[in-house]
């Protein structure tokens, strides 16, 4: 059973792969990533692709809105990672 | 035997620093092979060789800045292949004598004030060592030492000063690379300070030299988005299309049908291009902006464009672009992106003759078949070079662009 | 255009000795084995037969003794040439040379001069090991009142002796033992005397200056050839005289090339090469694009086995490397 902390670590790692200059930054888990940092749609797509590759979870486009915040991403991925 | 020269990688580039040779004398090279890495104000650019042959002699050592047009290496093209002993591996200072086309384009590049060694304080430990001869030469030639980068040994010597003091080109004081800042800082290969200067130079020139006109149109992207949603449902995450991909294709097709918007304006004449190499304005975190080109967009399928765009943006942000990507764009598309502002009135990147500025796709009320519906609308503002085209052409382009986007399945 | 003859360094010295003996009857040669044996390095072979015992004098095994006798003879109006077999043995005559030959003119307020010429062989390369392989030219070049010259070419070996004899003050001629067999050009006729106060540019160049003397001039030229093959043009200066030092030639060269490498078979620490570096620092600092480099003997007593002896003294490859280092290549 993958814990919240582990999923959060994975999400963060994917984020830093996409935007290496964010490493070490404080991330507000409830604020939209696009608002906190300069992440455009290209970065976001890379982020989603990275999450897919790291977790193996299929992420439909309709889910994108849930992935806008760190906590939202963790919540969205968790049930599907534990199937 | 042909000479491989330092290319001009931008309208305002006068000199570049050879950073690394990726081929060695004696190695065979093919057209399109990346032969070296050059550092410019816009970052590290991989430069390609344009003919088949064997790299013969390297004339410029890594770490040396030379003016555009300087011979970097010789390539033997007659198939003999043997690497000859270098006739004269002249150090970079001798390249300064190579004849250059006068660059009139950057009066805003300041003449660096001469350093005053007598009043200069003892060097701080963070500043590279500089030899006495170099210091003296810099004073004599009016080169600003604090802006010089050391050679590969970490020392600023005569070679570095003489390379910087190229007599027939205006001097560019290279800014030292800023240290990486926690958010939005520069990374290897990207020097944001220098890039800002390059953008300033290019945009000032654009504003000064190109008589712009602008034409706008609101385009209904609803059919595109409907199609995209259906497409992407069938695609795995890694293969999904962002809306900008069909946008690029549609724009390229429309540009192909409007040749007055596609090409370069040089030496008082317009040189149209029969290919559409689309410059994609790409923002860097921290404030940089580059518009490298995707080649032959009008003939590429959507997946090719998708992959090309992803790769291009990745390398742009990592600071590893190729010389052809920097110089080959025949027209540029600047896309603000989703969740941004309504419209974008852009300036053309010289020597191009048009730029397509796309605002954010926004849900707005729109009249469709006599009724008001909520549709996803995007403002497109085309800037054109009035020496080459007029409002009517731009308007024709916009009509073609809009029509293409109504039938995305045909893109 | 005068012709030249090709002779060995040894033959040039012998000719110089003969000429001096013939031109000036006050000249005589004194040293160990210079007479009957013909000279430890055969430089005076045949001279005893030609000029007799009074003028070619075999000396006992006492460097201090016969050097002192030479000083005495010079004080009394003769023009002696004292041959000290090697610089290693000259240590036994140091007091005579430093405290008498070098000082008598000064201490007598100019009433006496010591027009003495001393010849000694120097250096390593013949597997004569630690006690017989010294390069102590710097010790003598250190002393005011002495002049020290080091002919590196046959022409200089031929021409320096007469000029030294004409000098009213003591002159020491340093002959590197490995040069005696080397062949070189001397003028076929006419005056062969050369100056003993100037250096010579043996090879012009633009990228770096190699400063050498004695046996290292040939090594410097060999290094310059190698460097030329890589597109680096080195200027080679033959110092020719170690006291006085020709600053002008050195600084003119460094101002042109901006880089200098000094070659000296002696040890680096407190060696003669340090003097050249110091002078360049004083007079041409702002011309330098890199620190002045030195290629010197390794800080060990000179070894006996051939390969170790060669490893302990400067070689052309090291000079090449030093020049490239100065060019940061």
Image (cartoon, grey):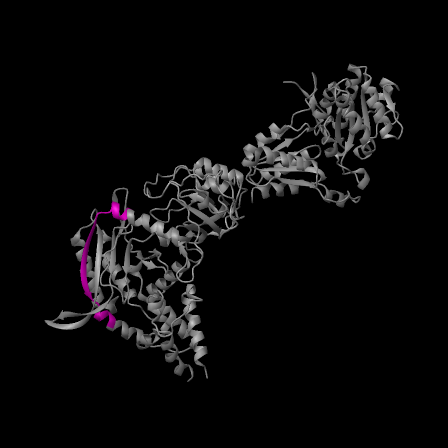
Residue at 27% from the left image edge and 71% from the top image edge: B228
Q: Position of residue C48 (x, y in %)?
A: 86, 21
Say which of C143 and C284 sits in front: C143
Whether the magenta-drawn stretch holds residue B224 is answered as: yes
Residue at 70% from the left image edge and 17% from the top image edge: C189
Q: Is residue B350 visible?
A: no
Q: Position of residue C303 (x, y in %)?
A: 78, 44
Task: Report the quarter where the C terminus of chain B lies.
Answer: bottom left
Would you identify the image quadrant in which residue A49 lies? bottom left
Q: Is residue B390 left or right of residue A52?
A: left
Would you identify the image quadrant in which residue B407 lies? bottom left
Q: Is residue B209 above or below residue B375?
A: above
Q: Is residue B60 above or below residue B288?
A: above
Q: Is residue B1 above or below residue C153?
A: below
Q: Position of residue C152 (x, y in %)?
A: 70, 30
Tally of marks: 0
User: Residue placed farthest to the left in the image?
Assistant: B370
* Magenta stretch, residue numbers: B205-225
Say which of C246 and B251 sits in front: C246
Q: Is residue C5 left or right of residue B69?
A: right
Would you identify the image quadrant in which residue A19 lies? bottom left
Q: Position of residue B229 (x, y in %)?
A: 27, 74
Q: Is residue C260 visible?
A: yes
Q: Is residue B223 left or right of residue A65?
A: left
Whether the magenta-drawn stretch holds residue B207 is answered as: yes
Q: Is residue B229 above or below residue B154?
A: below
């Amino acid at each position: 059973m993958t814990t919240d902390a582990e999923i959060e670590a994975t999400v963060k790692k994917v984020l830093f792969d996409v935007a290496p200059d964010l490493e070490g930054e404080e991330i507000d888990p409830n604020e939209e990533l696009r608002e906190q940092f300069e992440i455009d749609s290209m970065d976001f797509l890379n982020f989603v692709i990275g999450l897919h590759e790291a977790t193996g979870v299929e992420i439909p486009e309709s889910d994108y809105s849930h992935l806008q915040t760190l906590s939202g991403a963790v919540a969205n991925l968790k049930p599907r990672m534990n199937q | 035997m042909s000479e491989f020269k330092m290319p001009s990688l931008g309208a305002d580039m006068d000199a570049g620093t050879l950073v690394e040779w990726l081929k060695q004398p004696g190695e065979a090279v093919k057209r399109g092979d990346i032969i070296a890495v050059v550092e410019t104000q816009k970052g590290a650019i991989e430069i390609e060789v344009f003919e088949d042959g064997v790299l013969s002699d390297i004339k410029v050592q890594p770490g040396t800045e030379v003016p555009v047009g300087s011979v970097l290496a010789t390539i033997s093209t007659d198939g003999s292949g043997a690497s000859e002993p270098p006739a004269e591996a002249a150090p970079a200072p001798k390249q300064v004598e190579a004849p250059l086309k006068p660059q009139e384009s950057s009066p805003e590049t300041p003449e660096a004030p001469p350093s005053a060694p007598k009043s200069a304080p003892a060097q701080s430990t963070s500043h590279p060592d500089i030899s006495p001869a170099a210091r003296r030469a810099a004073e004599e030639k009016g080169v600003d030492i604090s802006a010089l980068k050391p050679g590969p040994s970490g020392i600023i010597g005569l070679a570095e000063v003489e390379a910087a003091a190229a007599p027939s080109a205006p001097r560019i004081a290279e800014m030292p690379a800023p240290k990486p800042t926690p958010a939005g800082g520069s990374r290897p290969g990207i020097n944001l300070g220098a890039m800002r200067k390059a953008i300033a130079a290019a945009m000032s020139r654009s504003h000064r030299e190109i008589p712009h006109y602008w034409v706008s149109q609101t385009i209904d992207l609803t059919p595109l988005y409907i199609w995209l949603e259906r497409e992407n449902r069938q695609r795995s995450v890694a293969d999904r299309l962002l809306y900008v991909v069909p946008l690029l294709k549609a724009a390229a097709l429309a540009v192909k049908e409007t040749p007055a918007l596609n090409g370069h304006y040089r030496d008082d004449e317009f040189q149209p291009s029969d290919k559409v190499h689309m410059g994609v304005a790409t923002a860097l975190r921290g404030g940089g902006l580059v518009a490298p080109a995707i080649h032959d967009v009008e003939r590429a399928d959507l997946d090719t464009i998708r992959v090309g765009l992803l790769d291009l943006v990745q390398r742009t942000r990592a600071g590893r672009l190729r010389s052809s990507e920097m110089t080959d764009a025949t027209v540029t598309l600047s896309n603000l992106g989703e969740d941004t502002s309504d419209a974008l009135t852009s300036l053309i990147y010289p020597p191009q003759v048009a730029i397509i500025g796309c605002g954010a796709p926004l849900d707005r009320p729109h009249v469709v078949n006599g009724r008001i519906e909520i549709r996803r609308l995007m403002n497109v503002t085309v800037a054109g070079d009035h020496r080459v085209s007029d409002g009517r052409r731009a308007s024709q382009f916009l009509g073609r662009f809009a029509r293409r986007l109504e039938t995305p399945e045909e893109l | 255009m005068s012709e030249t003859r090709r002779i060995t360094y040894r033959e040039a010295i012998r000719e110089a000795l003969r000429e001096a003996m013939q031109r000036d009857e006050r000249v005589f040669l004194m040293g160990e084995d210079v007479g009957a044996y013909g000279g430890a390095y055969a430089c005076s072979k045949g001279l005893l037969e030609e000029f007799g015992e009074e003028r070619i004098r075999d000396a006992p095994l006492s460097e201090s003794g016969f050097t002192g006798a030479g000083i005495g003879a010079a004080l009394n109006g003769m023009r002696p040439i004292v041959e000290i077999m090697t610089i290693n043995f000259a240590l036994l005559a140091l007091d005579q040379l430093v405290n008498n030959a070098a000082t008598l003119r000064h201490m007598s307020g100019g009433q006496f001069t010591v027009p003495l010429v001393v010849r000694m062989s120097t250096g390593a390369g013949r597997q004569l090991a630690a006690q017989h392989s010294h390069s102590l030219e710097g010790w003598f070049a250190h002393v005011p009142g002495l002049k020290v010259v080091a002919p590196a070419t046959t022409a200089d070996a031929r021409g320096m002796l007469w000029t030294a004899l004409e000098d009213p003050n003591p002159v020491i001629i340093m002959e590197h033992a490995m040069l005696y067999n080397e062949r070189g050009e001397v003028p076929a006729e006419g005056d062969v005397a050369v100056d003993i106060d100037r250096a010579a540019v043996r090879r012009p160049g633009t990228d770096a200056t190699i400063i050498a003397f004695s046996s290292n001039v040939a090594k410097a030229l060999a290094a310059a050839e190698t460097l030329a093959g890589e597109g680096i043009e080195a200027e080679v200066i033959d110092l020719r005289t170690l006291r006085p030092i020709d600053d002008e030639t050195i600084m003119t060269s460094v101002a042109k090339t901006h880089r200098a490498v000094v070659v000296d078979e002696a040890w680096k620490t407190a060696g003669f090469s340090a003097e050249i570096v110091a002078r360049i620092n004083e007079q041409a600092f702002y011309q330098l694009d890199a620190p002045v480099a030195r290629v010197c003997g390794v800080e060990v007593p000179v070894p006996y086995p051939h390969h170790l002896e060669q490893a302990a003294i400067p070689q052309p490859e090291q000079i090449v490397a030093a020049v490239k280092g100065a060019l940061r290549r």
